[in-house]
Amino acid sequence: MSEEFSSKPVGVRLRLFREKWGWSLPATARRLRELSAYTTGKEATVSADTVGRWERGVSFPRRKSQILLCQLLGVAPEDLGFSVVVPPVPARPHEGATLAQLLSWWLDTTTDRRMWLGPVLPRRFWPSIYSVEEDPLDHAVWSIGWYRRSGESSTRDSYARTLTQLHTLAQLVREAGTPSKPLVHAVASIAQLITEFAFDQRELTVATWYYSLTMVAVHEAGDQALETYAFVSCAHTHLEMGKAAPKAVLMVLPYALPEDMEVLPAALRAYILTVEAELRIRERDDAGADRCLKEATAAMSLADHEEPPAWLVFGHAEFAARYGRCLLVRGQVEEAQRWLEKALDSLDVLNSRRRAAILIDLAAAHLGQGHSADGCKYARQGLQFATEAGSDHVMERFNQLYTLLYRLITEPEVMEFLKESLQIIGDYYKIHRHPEYRHYPIAPAQWT
């Protein structure tokens, strides 16, 4: 900050920073109210006239308003002539914030900064982000089912498209004021899908934000099944990423499940039970794991007679993959191999991400049995699909294979594959983590 700028009155500095963002007095006041609702759960009593009085020096902002101004404008307190301590904008919104308040804050943040809260496509693809669908509610349901079933495009492509859909839904919520339940449910479903994409790209802060948005939306929509799925999938992802212990997840899992599991769709029950089985295997509770797998098999047989919700895709291919994964963790590699091959045969060829995960587990099963040739074959295919999917999460799972590969390093095919894979992985991270490709989130204070 220059000496000339620091000598200006507080009101003049505030006006200059506001004009730098191109905001009017009413727009600035509205943004302050929305930021207050996000951080405290209550809207601040700030009007355009209040901001004008601050700028003219007629009145001086109180402590809470000083903090909000610094967070909103993304400046240090001393830049505005304040002496308060400004905390970062939290990744999770306040529990008292409503869905409409969260989406309004999200719209302003992403539109004003020309950036989404998460990695998106390069700038040349941005114009499509501002398109408006003719029937966004029907399109939201259709797109969720399409993304989950086909997986044709990369994770990053799907990420940007679902953010586009959320932008359209957020605009409808803002126009409606009090959104209808179908509209809230569409927001919840899309937000849950974006949460999974963010986890897949290892964007934990971003995933936390969209998970919070999902939970606010499902509470307002009253969808217990989606709320349960969102919690379990989030907990399981944290487990896979090494951010949570199996014992801790097992302790909190009962609080997330309804008393009567029969109220949930059969496919969802099968998914939850396979997750619980893996947790119990990791905790060496073999009897509990066997019970969960038996109940999951029974639930999966009932799933064929039900129409699952659009946001859930858990068919026989996914069930076989999860079952094989459980057996792989347990060390029953031969039986795990049979289940994983069954999952691979019944999986849609277009879904690169899920195919990559199954192939990597199948490679682990073969390498665990000392089958170096077959292990390298499946590992090579898994690496190819993981690269096509653009999935950081699956790529991290592939990195776990190196422990098994190094045990067989004396085999010629293993040595050849190690050289090949290291080159491919190096090129992958060079492309996908390059600053010109990867756009990190921008929001007040925390990310500026």
Image: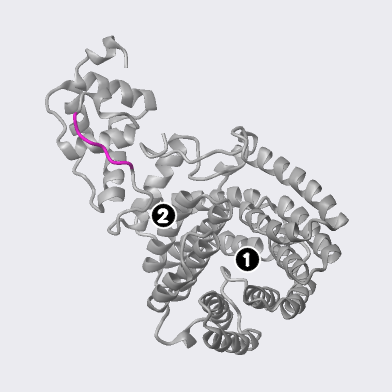
Q: Is residue 151 visible?
A: no
**Residue 5 locus on image (x, y percent):** 28, 14
Which numbered disc, 2 or 1, marks the residue that appears first in the sequence?
Answer: 1
**Residue 114 locus on image (x, y percent):** 49, 35
- By secondary structure, the bulk of the magenta-drawn segment is best described as loop
Which quarter of the rendering shows the N terminus?
Answer: top left
The residue tagged 1 is 145
The residue tagged 2 is 173
Picture quadrant where residue 287 is located:
bottom right
Q: Residue at x 62, y 71 (%)?
A: 313
Question: What is the secondary structure assignment of the residue under circle 1?
Answer: helix
Residue 261 falls within the magenta-colored stretch: no
The span picked out in magenta is 83-88
Q: Residue furthest top?
A: 4
> Which sits in the foreground, 398 or 350?
398
Question: What is the secondary structure assignment of the residue under circle 2?
Answer: helix
Q: Can you say whether 227 is above or below 393 in the image? A: below
Q: Residue at x 49, y 71 (%)?
A: 229
